[in-house]
Amino acid sequence: MLKFCMRIFSLFALSASVLFFIFNSAFAGNPTKVGFVYLTTPGDHGWTYAHELGKQMVEKQFGNDVKVSVVENVPEGPDATRVIRELAKQGNEIIFTTSFGYMEPTLKVAKEFPNVKFEHITGYKRSKNVATGNIRFYEGRYIQGVVAGLMTKTNKIGYIGAYPIAEVIMGINSFAQGLRSVNKDASISVIWANTWYDPVKEADAAKVHIAEGADILAQHTDSPAMLQIAEKKGALGFGQSTDMSAFAPKAQLFASINNWGPYYIRKIEELKSGKWNTGDGPDHWAGNDWGGLKAEMLLISKFQNMPDSVAKKAQEALDGLKSGKINIFAGPLVDNTGKEIIPAGKSLDDGALWGMNYYLKGVNGKVPG
Amino acid sequence: MLSGAVGALGAVLWLGNPYFGIIAGALSGIFMASIFSIFTINFMTNQVATGLGLTIFATGLTGLAGAPLIGKTVPSLPKIEIFLLSEIPFVGEILFKQDFIAYLSIAIIIFITYFLKYSKSGIVLRAVGDDHQSAHSVGYPVKKIRWYATCFGGMCAGIGGAYIPLVLTPHWSEGMTAGRGWIALALVVFASWIPWRIIVGALIFGGITIAQLVGQSRGWPIPSQILSMMPYLATIVALTMISGRISKTNSVVPASLGKPFFDTQ
């Protein structure tokens, strides 16, 4: 009899626990598993560090409702495919791949795991379960141009670019538009480093710019080397990706800061509520989740080392961009050889920005290659 | 170089004086060289494979050791102006207004030239490099001598690495040498193992590196990629010239280069 009671009891307990488990997973919710793939370690103090801050915002926002896995130092190429596949296998429901070179690997793995959502950062190819997200970095460069135009004494701006690709070129052109909005005599000369990250080369390029007479420096590479040289030689410049004023307290005018957190949080919320989509539609470029100052995906650090009058102009430019009053690439636009790009009354759309292979007026030389 | 860089920056942060950074950089370089020596000299492993392995290991190790240094900056080495000489227009600016490591590098070249050519120990070192069996049979401790030489090389590489955070860009970030150390290998070949030619080679290599940046800034009509290619092209030309000469006289390349020494015979 006792044995029978025990059996009944244990059956009851078992079914209760199974019921509890089902109930628990259905209503209290298992944590959403989120994967991140990083190009380097957060120790780069630049690109990947900014993604790490975004990831931390996700953890803070969702707490126990998410379980985040990160793989650092993943080279772009076959290794990336393996890492992304492994993350998908482990049951991550949404995977953020945070570098341009992960584009093909992401698409490849996405095909094998149709139920997993993928978010490729800075890419332009989408599929059924791959969305793309990016930041309108060029908006910050417009403000840099305004500040540079007001601060320069030599009217020479030194710009260090990584590679002559559309993303970097639109930054240079946006800078030129800001520059010429306040100073028609100043011009930009560009040195291509042909690397995203090589502190020594970036420092050398900065020294050459200063020796050639530039007094304001801007960069589209990742290390704080340029600002350190500016600090040493009494020039001024802008921080990249993160606030770099610790490296150059007297030289940094301001920094454009990449703020991925709100984007990650929004996409994970969409996934949780079943509203996640790739944004694909008839206009390919409109589907790209491309937020800037207004979406607060791009932040501007404190304006410093400049007179109040300049800081005021910079603030006006920032407000104008946020409200949409300033349209950076509004016609009439001519390139630096005098060829018309777009007539008055029209402006460049996102697709045209991603096809940029020319310099606008205010930039010296021509795009290599 | 990476270990030199991280060691130097750590020491400066800890002790506050950039000159300690040079010593720390040198010691870190020696540390790496002794790991290399243990494997290649005592365990007689393949030198190329061990070297590659050590490079990858050092990248990881320095990343780990450097993690607390991220985001910190240090005072850089001051320029030393040599009294009166630095006032000479143009030449004075170039020759007598450099930092300590720049002077040190020239002193090291002069020392090595003297050492290898005129001192007895230098001649023994060359013998060990050219024919370790003969050197061994006359009673020289081949392994010990190779240990010293490797550590000296490591020390120089460490000081070279220390130069980056101490002078060029006073901060630490992972892999900040960006493979610059390999240029040293190209330089040795370019100089065909003759010390004073290293100075010439280094000036040409460095000059071309800067020239391609200046060229871009001034809008020279040469693609920057061609100028970036030049140092390596020069190395290949130098190699061709050396191999042309080998047929006529003895090789300038140390005959036992890369060969492990077995002392059992």
Image (cartoon, coloured by chain):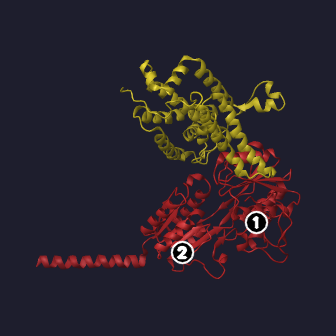
Depth check, front residue: A229 or B123: B123
Depth check, front residue: A2 or A343: A343
Q: Is residue A204 left or right of residue B154?
A: right
Extreme-right residue of the structure: A185
- Residue at image point 47% right, 44% down: B53
The chain under label 2 reads A
Image chain in yellow: B
Give the residue number, with chain letter if any, for mark 1: A318
Extreme-left residue of the structure: A1
Q: Which class describes the residues within 10 Å of circle 1: few (<14), some (14-19), or many (20+)?
A: many
Element at badge 2? helix
The label shown at residue A269 is 2
Vertical placement of residue B36 versus B214, above or below: above
The spot of residue B201 in percent (x, y) is 67, 35
Q: Is residue B264 left or right of residue A221?
A: left
Q: Is residue B168 visible?
A: yes
Q: Which class describes the residues within 10 Å of circle 2: few (<14), some (14-19), or many (20+)?
A: some
Image chain in red: A
Distance from disc 2 to disc 1, alpha carbons, whole Å, reads 29 Å
